[in-house]
Amino acid sequence: MLNNPFEVTKAVDFTNQEIASRFVSFSSAEFPLVDPRSPITHYLVGGKGGGRTHLMRFYSYPLQKARAKHGLLAHIETEGYIGVYAPASGLDGSRFEGASIDRGAWRAVFAQSFETRLVMLLLDVLSDIQDTESPWTDSALSNFSAELAHLVLDLHVEASSRPLHAIRASLTTMQQQLDAAVNNAPLTRSLSVGIRFNPGSLLFGVGMLAQQLAGLHDVKITYMLDELENLTESQQMFVNTLVREKELPTCFLIGAREWGVRTYQTLSAGEENKEGSEFRKVVPETAYSQNEDSYRQFCIAMITTRLREAGLNPEAADDWTAKLSVARGTPLMDETLLRAIGGRDRRHLMRLALVVEQATGDRELANQAVENARFDDHPLLEKLTILRGYQAWSKARVFVPSQFSSARSFIEPLRQGAADARLTNYLNLWKHDMAAQIYADHINEQPYGGIDTFIDMSGHLPRSLLVILKYVTSRADWHNEKPFLGQEFIPTSTQSAGIRDASGWYLNDVKPLGELGTHCDNAIRRLGSLLRDVRYADKPSEVNVTSFSSNLDEVDEKTVEVLNSCVKHRMLIEIVGGRQGRNQGSVHRKYQIHPMLAPFFALGFGRRGDLTLSGTEVKALFSPGSEESDFQSVAKKRTAPMRAPFAPPSQDQLF
Amino acid sequence: MSSYDYSIFTKTRLAPIEVPSLRFDLLISAYNDSERVTSAFNLINAAEKHWIVYDEYGYTPAERPAADCWSPLVGESVIDAWERFFAEISLDPHLDVAIDITGMMRPHLLLLPLMLKRAGLARATFLYSDPVSYVSGPTTTFTKGPVERVAVVPGFVGTHRTSINARDCLVIGAGYDHDLVKAVAESKRNSDHFLLVGMPGLQPHMYQESVYRISQVRESINDFRARSLLFAPANNPFMTAQVLSDHINNVRQKQGIDNIYLCPVGPKTQVLGFAWYYLCEAVGTATSLIFPYAQRYSRETSTGLAAVHTFELEFDAFQ
């Protein structure tokens, strides 16, 4: 039986060979997204699951070696760089703090440890090249090692026939002594470490020495520092200083989650590195979102590659996404909606009767309104008629029977297949929200399905797409629906359930650590709840609402911090350019709830309407100090005008 | 093959009715609202008794126990706190000392055997009380506040191998707090991940509940499958140490693992087992303990007192 090709969703679970065989390029460029040979430092930042680690590992030396079909050094010369992959988690940065030791001392020791470690990794690469095809003479290597030894004070190197190994061993000993001093500091309360070289001198020096080796003259040495978020602000300042002061051929490619870049400050007289000057920031999701067609092709290629690697024959792999097809149905969705309602009473008609009778005290008027709205075979037309009637009622603020007879006249041509452009537009605008209300009213989960839905939902995070596929195919497997055999569709119910699983996972997975995580979690749950209340209101103020905008007037710093953290952790997406304010002409900041979270709150995926929120309302949602009762009060006030009877019962009605 | 046989250490299990037979010169216990903690403190005979009250439980002065109690200072390192505590109670290394670890903060517990040895003790009795059940069943959390950071445990840091092909392994001692498991696993994304779970659990239903909780964060655990799970009895730190010893020897020898990270976030007995393994076998190797530090912990997580376990720690077992 075929192993689930979507079981592994993280690059760390792949061997180098698997990384190579499953790599899919986003573009036709030799080096997509970032060029590891670039003399300017690139920060590859983004949300969790953007493909950063997969890309950095693909660029790293072990994969370069695997790609070298006609000589390793020749291949490196052709590619123009050596990629030294160094995840920051291996540094255990938390060792370099506390124990009542001065922060400056810790910073100096961290710098020594950091540079030594990177140089040791480079020496491993050079040794491996030498062990593979011996391109360098003993004399060249002896000179290299001797000159490297001069970069470090009092570094004793044993005479050896393998100079690279000997200098590596000396650096290892030095590193172990440093580690021992650092590790014992909490118990000894002292840090007895000699500073053996100036910041940058070892790292940049060894790069220049390597250039003297045959074949490396025009080759960049690119240190790929992944997981920068594992370093403290002070430690990142040292990395930033290296970025600022860097000397070719040494280059850096830095990987981090967006929230993990704590500072761009350096230790160079407090200077800050500037984007476009000292570094360039590349966000994979942004690149993907700028070319939706390419992103779709990229996703399909990723799926197909995995299926083929798992053993599916090429033809079946290429056609596999058809198994996720969902029945299109008729424009009015009659069959699916009638099935959703089943034998139950129609809740929307019952509610209409209730609110009209509440407003007028007249059961006959209520029955008339219901009769005007009734389309037995077309539940969607009933919902659209009621919506139209509610819209007129809300505008007039009083109930008038003609509101629902007019609404019927407006909607009726849809039944007859004679809708004009205005009516067709009305149908297209409200169809999905009204269908969603019918599902919700009749105790049905929202149906989701289809590869395009999955891709939209991923929010340009490829890993999220894989997680969706994993949950969907796992469920299909449990139901014995043979997700990787034959051509039968995976039922929409299975796809929907898998999507909801993935959405729940995402909500738990992306929230930040610490107190901020709790605040972000609360805020997103409140926002999702408010958007859901709007979508499922009698008269939603917006179509397919998944976004909000605000001028953030009088919003305090702590609230903005939570809002920004939600963006950095991909719970929200900030829309570039914002939105023009409706009254003052000012530009509002605009945010969309991440599409991975939409099913959790039974929302749609598009970004059609947005809710304009005042600063006070934003605070009720996002402020760490906002109580649940504050939010409930704001949400109630906000959605009250969307609920029939649209005016207090005491207000006079015309009938 | 293990280089160490942990079955040489002594443990006993006492029913609640047998607990008053325990006699010590000095009893130290960490205060919280759990019945098993307060009952054991009252039932055990000792000439001198001290409560430790942790700020992380958030007790107000009025809520603290009336008996003699001591607290670490806010921001004080664990090593400093233990040294100050021993100095303030004038700890006599020749006394027969018992420490109830049931309510103890894990970072403090991890360092306790080492700090007792540094204080001159040759041995001590560690006590742990089994609950009848946890308050909220499978949804119980012990960590009330969120995880603030994952960091090495000072004093338990090894010298790790740096290499382009170095392989790391993370063993998480898992209990009910799946968010802690997630935080730790994600802090060591480039490691092989293993989870050590209590089997049998402290009570029969607890194994299933903890595995259910772990499954909620499976996406954060690298290559999560049946082989990712290791099992050791939840109430036996020596067996925990033995399982760790066997597993780590195995992955080092057969899988070429270089660097080991250990993180106990499960029952306190398991935490003690991790510390004991480290002290007995891992000092000076490429092994470190890491921990997800949180600001607040639940005060009351269990009901009843089912049994009291005693573990005799002999500090000449390590250097």
Image (cartoon, grey):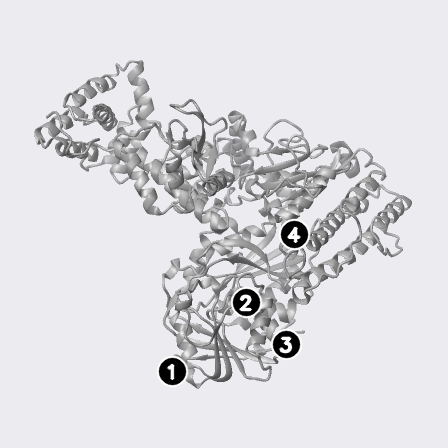
Residue type at tag 1: Ile
Residue that label 3 marks: B317
Which mark, residue B108?
A: 2
Decide: few, some or many residues near mark 3? Use Cα within 10 Å; few <14, some 14-19, many ≥20.
few
Quadrant in which residue A654 is drawn? top left
Q: Give the mark toward the camera: 1 or 2.
A: 2
Of mark 3 and mark 2, the one earlier in the sequence is 2
Query: Would you identify the image quadrant in which residue B260 lies?
Result: bottom right
> Residue reaching furthest right?
A139
Q: Looking at the image, tell me whether mark 1 or mark 2 is earlier in sequence order.
A: 1
Is the residue A19 above or below the residue B89 in the image? above
Q: Nearer the viewer, residue A379 or A429?
A: A429
Judging by the rendered image, the residue that carries numbered circle 1 is B17
Nearer-the-camera pick, A594 or B164: A594
What's under tag 2, amino acid-wise?
His
Q: Is residue A63 visible?
A: yes
The answer to whether the residues at label 3 and label 2 have Cβ atoms under 8 Å apart is no
Name the image quarter holding the C terminus of chain A: top left
Query: Do marks 1 and 3 share a subunit?
Result: yes
Q: Position of residue A490 (x, y in %)?
A: 40, 37
- The chain that hosts pointer 3 is B
Category of crowding for the residue at label 1, using alpha-carbon neighbours closer than 10 angstroms: few (below 14), some (14–19), many (at least 20): few
Q: Are marks 3 and 2 on the same chain?
A: yes
Report which quarter residue A394 is drawn in. top left
In the picture of the structure, the residue carrying the numbered disc 4 is: A90
CA separation in Å, label 1 and label 2: 29 Å
Give the numbered dot on residue A308: none
Q: Secondary structure at mark 4?
A: helix
